[in-house]
Amino acid sequence: MIDLNSLLACPRCDNPLTDFRCVACQVDFPVRGGVPWLFAEPGAAMSEWHNRWQLALANLEQERKRVTAALKKHSDTQASVRLELLQHGYAEQKKCLAKLLEPLARHAPADLETYLALKTRPPTQQGLFTYAANLHRDWCWGEAENQSALVAVSSLLKETRPEKILVLGAGAGRLAYDLHQSLENAITVALDFNPLLVYAATHIVKGETVIMWEFPLAPRRAEDVALERSLSAPKPVRDGFYYILADALRAPFKAAQFDVVITPWFVDIVEESPAKLIPRINRLLDVGGIWINYGSLAFNQSDPADRLSLQEFITLSSTCGFTNIVSSEAAVPYMNCPNSRHGRIEEVVTIKAVKQSDVPQSRRHEALPDWIVGGKQPVPLTQSFQSQASVTRIHAFIMSLIDGKRTIKDMADVLEQQKLMQKQEAISAIRGFLITMFEEEGSGRGY
């Protein structure tokens, strides 16, 4: 049996770990709720996710209160059944999260300076609930979707007998679980950075049932607005399956440890450019190892040059030490919750590549630049900063003109007098700004 510890390396310095400890860095990486936290600064990562967890609970409570207020106004209408169900669902979801994420409550907060010094943090756009729907798809109603993913990936491994498989960005974990159950490999490591997904999946693959509530985006019926789900696996996972919490861009493994690396719905959503990411994937594989990418390949990087086409992606992979690259495309169901009208058909790309050689490694991933971390370098005057500064000044000036007496036209006259805008342009800008403020206040976001 291959031991997980034998594969691990420090995400800070790449030295081997001994019982989740880096002797060189003098850092102990904790195991909470049975899951190793292998971020570069685990205490800071726990603090970050603890805060996001508390924010999620606060948002749920706010939504519950808004529904309660609406229920008081509409208690005698047809809407009352739907509102009562939502009210109950939000309250119960808070209890589910409190139980599921209890390991987050048992740690001492890390100081921000330590966190910044390592220049690592979970992406700000990834909240605790960003991929919560995947839990319901993976472990409740998504058998067709789960099966299509398993067939697409496992069919590319049928002529091999991998021993060590790594799934980067494993999410709710069904694909990693299905592969481990269907193949005879010794060890499968499922890595993700979201503790909600990881802790839920950790319980589920053991054979436990996890209760969570689902709130479909487009419920078919009134009773579909809030659904109590029982999440469970077909059977307990066999030995050799491990979940870890870590940053895939600082994957905590020794080089050349895996026979297979799988990146499901991953390479096109990470913040890092493909040119930096693919060498990191190369490093994790032994020569002759297989990389399989599965997903939509819909790049959304800030740099337009990084929004690669399929052919560009294949060409780049070939320059990063991979050969024998093959790809296929298929239309598959995606997030087709039976209680929602929001599901769709997605055309996914499956790519298989074989590692031919090692390549020079990208610089260690840093989420934050030196001018933020150190504070000793000039803050660059980027185009986005300049644009935002201009917009902020105008919005601040508009806010200063709101006195309960001036009309939009009165305010536009002032902007024209100050030579900030022509009057008609100012009227349009002021009205747009006020519409945004009004809608945010009405939606509950204006606080």
Image (tube, grey):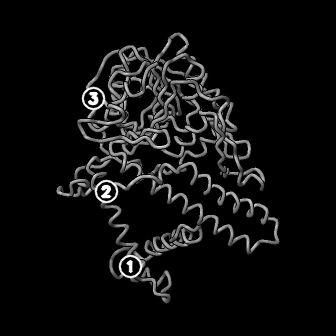
Query: In 3D space, how far apart are the residues under numbered discs 1 and 2 (Cα atoms)?
Result: 44 Å
Residue 144 image point, x, y percent: 68, 30
Residue 170 image point, x, y percent: 50, 34
Closer to the camera, 386 or 273?
Answer: 273
Going by the numbered disc 2, the residue's amino acid type is Asp
Q: Which of pointers 2 and 3 indicates the residue nearer the eye?
A: 2
Q: Which of pointers 1 and 2 indicates the residue nearer the eye?
A: 2
Residue 367 image point, x, y percent: 32, 46
Crowd class of label 3 (few under 14; some 14 to 19; many from 20; radius 10 Å): some
Question: Residue at 42% across / 37% down in the picture?
Answer: 307
223 sits left or right of 265 in the view: right
Q: Which of pointers 1 and 3 indicates the residue nearer the eye?
A: 3
Residue under label 3:
361
Q: Secondary structure at mark 1?
A: helix
Quarter assignment of residue 417: bottom left
Closer to the camera, 232 or 404?
Answer: 232
147 sits left or right of 357 in the view: right
Q: Secondary structure at mark 3?
A: loop
Going by the numbered disc 1, the residue's amino acid type is Leu
Residue that lies at the very extreme toward the top in this rendered image: 159
Earlier along the polypeptide chain: callout 1 or callout 3? 3
Crowd class of label 2 (few under 14; some 14 to 19; many from 20; radius 10 Å): few
Residue under label 2:
111
Residue under label 1:
415
Crowd class of label 1 (few under 14; some 14 to 19; many from 20; radius 10 Å): many
Going by the numbered disc 3, the residue's amino acid type is Gln
Question: Residue at 53% across / 10% down in the picture?
Answer: 159
Residue that lies at the very extreme toward the bottom in this rendered image: 405
Question: Residue at 51% across / 17% down in the picture?
Answer: 185
